[in-house]
Image (cartoon, rainbow, N blue to C red):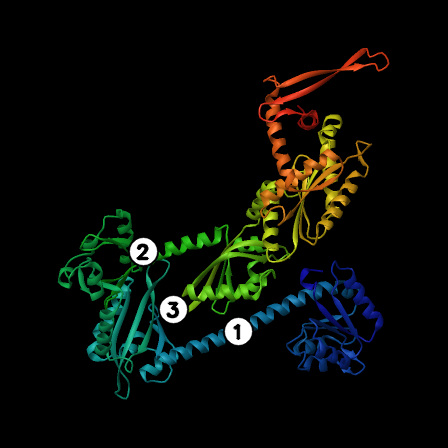
């Protein structure tokens, strides 16, 4: 079955179930089976039709509750649904009667008919469609003719046509109304029409018609008509010659309009002249040779020439020499053919200033249908073109900007967005138009933030700042946002324009730079620089309370041995493990930092007592001392901790860190212990600093002295050996004991 039947609904009315099966089988063999609805009576069929009208009805003629004529005559079916009668009863007379009553086809039930039923249905549906189209065309034609007649009656205008060879004149109804006679056949042709023309105007009309026939011309005339009762009216007639295939004029067709009541020619001319004088557009009228015969004041203002300078001159007066000859050749060719010429031309004012104008030139016909004048309407479009160029540039910027742009009306409804907006936010234009910008809110700013923003915007006309917004997928992102207001001439806000840039990458880069500057890349802990900032902030907060601030300096004992024996990778792994163990010992307020290769610090704000710091230090030492697996080998590590407390040991970060480091150096001598800072450590620390500096040059300066101490056998008093002892003779400190400088040599690797 064709595609026309793919959606076809067929109502089958047949009380013979075997025939219904034959119909169903016939359609089942088709590629696409229509929807078949079966019923056995006319009454049930009408109920189906009333509920949901089918596209086609196939019905037996004789049924239990009446014959098909009832169906054909029903208002639900007649001329609305095509009906095919499929029956075993009946004869040729019945077939004629059925078709006459509105059935599309009459088919006898035979095996061949059932097989060919789909083709018959297709043919009947096509004929039904054509029939309906023809009926609609007739209706449209009648409506069109009625509308034309009504329009002509309203305009007091009729159309006419003269067949020259047959001398027959056809006139519409309105023509007879204008002539004041009933509709009839004008047996005397054109002469009978001319008999209604006023005696003084008849020769003019006859000459115009004769000229149109001889020269294949058009004409426009105003003349008087004398109606049979002697009433004189003024009419306007326009005619056009129509030539046959050989170029001979065979017809003239035209219109005739009663202009008596709408015409007071002089008043109209005066009104037209006043309108032309007052026109903002520049207007000139030239004769057939291009000589200016009239110009309005706007033309004088535009060109800079006085009226007397324009009259008698030609438009070459303002030729800017910006166009080639082809432009003017096209101009003359167009207007001499009676067509309108329109273009944009660069002209020159009297003072030499060039300007761009939009120019339209139209030809004017005389009563003989000949071109007698040209009317040129000019408009300076220099500013408009510049504005259009700026608007185009702005539109290009809007469309191709990498920054998101949205425009809201004065009620803060989004009215336009650019492609970058959709790319950044994930919202397409049709999804966002009409919505409020609050659809993008991330919830990270409070009402006070937005209140301040609107206050600045309404008072200053602009607001700029960083805002966190939310994309369509729920992801929040930072943007640099600038909102400006657009106001009308009354200084009222008409639009809000928002321009924003997604600064996610910039923020991430800044955060990465910050992490590189302030965090240890191995342990992700704050580094020495950030630890000073953390301690400074903690001291500032504790100035307002009675709490202490503690600083723990943690030094890993003999860390360099791990690097030398197990490698730097193992050393890095060890530092990461120790960092985690230190953090595990911290309270919620404590902050840990790595300040050198084997040194950590813990800053403890809000510390209640030194005892608390002592417990924390011991807890850290115990945690670090737990076995550590490195390269499948169990390793034991110890640490030393120095503790300084603010405000007792210092009131700024530099002093506190230095004090904690000094205490740590004392703790290292004890091994795997912690020490609180005291003033004596400052003195000892200074001596150690001096000794460290001096030891590097002591050997070069021969400051080391070797002493031999004899070993004597007590029983005999005989010398049996000697013990060598090294001493350091410092130029300032004097003789320094080995107990003081040897640990420094071991610590520094000297």
Which comes before the other along the chain, label 1 or label 2? 1
Q: Which residue lies furthest to the bottom in this view?
A: 229
Label of residue 157 in the image? none
Question: How many numbered tags mark residues here?
Answer: 3
Q: Is mark 1 on a helix, strand or loop?
A: helix
The residue at the point 62 percent across, 28 percent down is: 692
Q: Please tell me whether residue 728 is drawn above or below residue 191 in the rendered image.
A: above
**CB of mark 1 within 8 Å of CB of mark 2?**
no
Determine crowd level at label 3: few under 14, some 14-19, many 20+ residues with C-alpha closer than 10 A. few
The residue at the point 49 percent across, 65 percent down is: 454
Q: Is mark 2 on a helix, strand or loop?
A: strand
Observer able to see residue 527: no
Q: Is mark 3 on a helix, strand or loop?
A: loop
Determine crowd level at label 2: few under 14, some 14-19, many 20+ residues with C-alpha closer than 10 A. few
Q: In which quarter of the image is the N terminus?
A: bottom right
Q: Mark 1 points at which residue?
A: 138
Q: Distance between the residues labelled 3 and 1?
A: 60 Å
Q: Distance between the residues labelled 1 and 2?
A: 44 Å
Q: Quadrant of the C terminus?
A: top right
Q: Mark 3 points at which residue?
A: 491
Q: Mark 2 points at which residue?
A: 343
Image position, residue 475 (x, y; %): 63, 55
Judge depth for marks 1 and 2 and give the one in front: 2
Which comes before the other along the chain, label 2 or label 3? 2
Q: Please tell me whether residue 70 is drawn above or below residue 527 in the rendered image.
A: below
Observer able to see residue 490: yes
- Where residue 653 sits, quadrant-wise, is top right
Along the viewing direction, whichever of 382 and 527 lies nearer the viewer? 527
Q: Please tell me whether residue 309 is drawn above or below residue 158 in the rendered image.
A: above
The residue at the point 27 percent across, 77 percent down is: 194
Along the viewing direction, whichever of 417 and 271 lies nearer the viewer? 417
The residue at the point 45 percent across, 76 percent down is: 145
């Amino acid at each position: 079955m064709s595609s026309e039947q793919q959606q076809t609904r067929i109502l089958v009315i047949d009380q013979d179930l075997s025939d219904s099966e034959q119909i169903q089988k016939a359609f089942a063999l088709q590629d696409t089976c229509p929807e078949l609805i079966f019923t056995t009576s006319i009454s049930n069929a009408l109920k189906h039709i009333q509920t949901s009208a089918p596209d086609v009805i196939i019905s037996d003629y004789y049924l239990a509750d009446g014959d098909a004529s009832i169906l054909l005559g029903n208002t639900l079916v007649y001329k609305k649904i095509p009906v095919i009668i499929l029956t075993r009863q009946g004869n040729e007379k019945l077939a004629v009667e059925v078709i006459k009553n509105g059935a599309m086809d009459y088919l006898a039930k035979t095996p061949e008919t059932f097989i060919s039923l789909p083709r018959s249905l297709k043919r009947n549906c096509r004929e039904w469609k054509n029939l309906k189209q023809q009926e609609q065309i007739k209706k449209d034609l009648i409506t069109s003719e009625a509308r034309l007649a009504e329009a002509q009656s309203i305009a007091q205008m009729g159309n006419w046509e003269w067949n020259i060879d047959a001398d027959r004149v056809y006139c519409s109804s309105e023509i007879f109304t204008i002539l004041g006679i009933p509709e009839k056949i004008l047996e005397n042709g054109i002469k009978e029409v001319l008999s209604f023309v006023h005696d003084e105007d008849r020769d003019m009309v006859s000459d115009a018609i004769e000229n149109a026939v001889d020269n294949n011309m058009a004409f426009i005339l105003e003349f008087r008509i004398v109606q049979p009762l002697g009433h004189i009216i003024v009419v306007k007639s326009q005619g056009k010659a129509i030539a046959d295939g050989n170029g001979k004029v065979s017809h003239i067709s035209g219109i005739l309009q009663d202009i008596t009541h709408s015409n007071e020619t002089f008043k109209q001319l005066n009104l037209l002249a006043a309108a032309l004088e007052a026109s903002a557009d520049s207007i000139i009228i030239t004769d057939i040779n291009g000589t200016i015969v009239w110009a309005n004041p706007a033309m004088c203002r535009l060109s800079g020439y006085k009226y007397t300078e324009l009259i008698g001159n030609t438009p070459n007066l303002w030729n800017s020499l910006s166009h080639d000859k082809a432009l003017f050749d096209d101009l003359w060719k167009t207007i001499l053919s009676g067509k309108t010429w329109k273009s944009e031309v660069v002209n020159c004012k009297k003072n030499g200033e060039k300007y761009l104008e939009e120019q339209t030139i139209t030809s004017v016909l005389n009563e003989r249908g000949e071109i007698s004048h040209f009317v040129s309407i000019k408009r300076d479009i220099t500013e408009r073109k510049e504005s259009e160029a700026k608007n185009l540039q702005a539109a290009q910027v809007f469309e191709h900007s990498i920054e998101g742009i949205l425009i809201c009306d004065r009620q803060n409804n989004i009215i336009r967005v650019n492609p970058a907006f959709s790319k950044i936010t994930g919202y397409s234009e049709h999804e966002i138009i009409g919505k409020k910008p609050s659809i993008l809110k991330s919830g990270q700013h409070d009402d006070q933030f937005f209140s301040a923003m609107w206050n600045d915007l309404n008072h200053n006309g602009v607001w700029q700042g960083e805002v966190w917004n939310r994309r369509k997928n729920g992801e929040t992102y930072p943007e640099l946002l600038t909102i400006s207001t657009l106001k009308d001439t009354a200084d009222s806000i008409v639009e809000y324009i928002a321009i924003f840039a997604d600064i996610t990458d910039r923020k991430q880069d800044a955060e990465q730079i910050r992490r590189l500057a302030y965090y240890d890349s191995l342990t992700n802990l704050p580094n020495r620089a950030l630890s000073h900032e953390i301690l400074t902030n903690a001291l500032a907060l504790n100035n307002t309370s009675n709490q202490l601030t503690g600083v723990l300096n943690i030094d890993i004992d003999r860390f360099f041995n791990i690097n030398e024996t197990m490698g730097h990778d193992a050393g890095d792994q060890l530092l990461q493990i120790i960092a985690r163990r230190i953090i595990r010992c911290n309270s919620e307020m404590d902050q840990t930092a790595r300040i050198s290769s084997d040194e950590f610090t813990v800053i403890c704000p809000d510390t209640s007592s030194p005892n608390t710091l002592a417990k924390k230090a011991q807890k850290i030492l115990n945690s670090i001392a737990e076995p550590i697996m490195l390269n499948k080998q169990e390793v034991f590590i110890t640490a030393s901790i120095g503790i300084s407390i603010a405000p007792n040991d210092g009131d700024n970060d530099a002093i506190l860190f230095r004090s904690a480091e000094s205490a740590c150096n004392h703790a290292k001598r004890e091994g795997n212990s912690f020490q609180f800072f005291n003033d004596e450590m400052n003195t000892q620390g200074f001596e150690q600093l001096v000794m460290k500096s001096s030891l590097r040059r002591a050997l070069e300066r021969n400051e080391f002295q070797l002493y031999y101490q004899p070993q004597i056998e007590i029983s005999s008093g005989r010398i049996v050996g000697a013990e060598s002892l090294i001493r350091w003779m410092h130029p300032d400190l004097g003789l320094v004991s080995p107990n003081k400088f040897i640990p420094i040599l071991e610590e520094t690797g000297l």
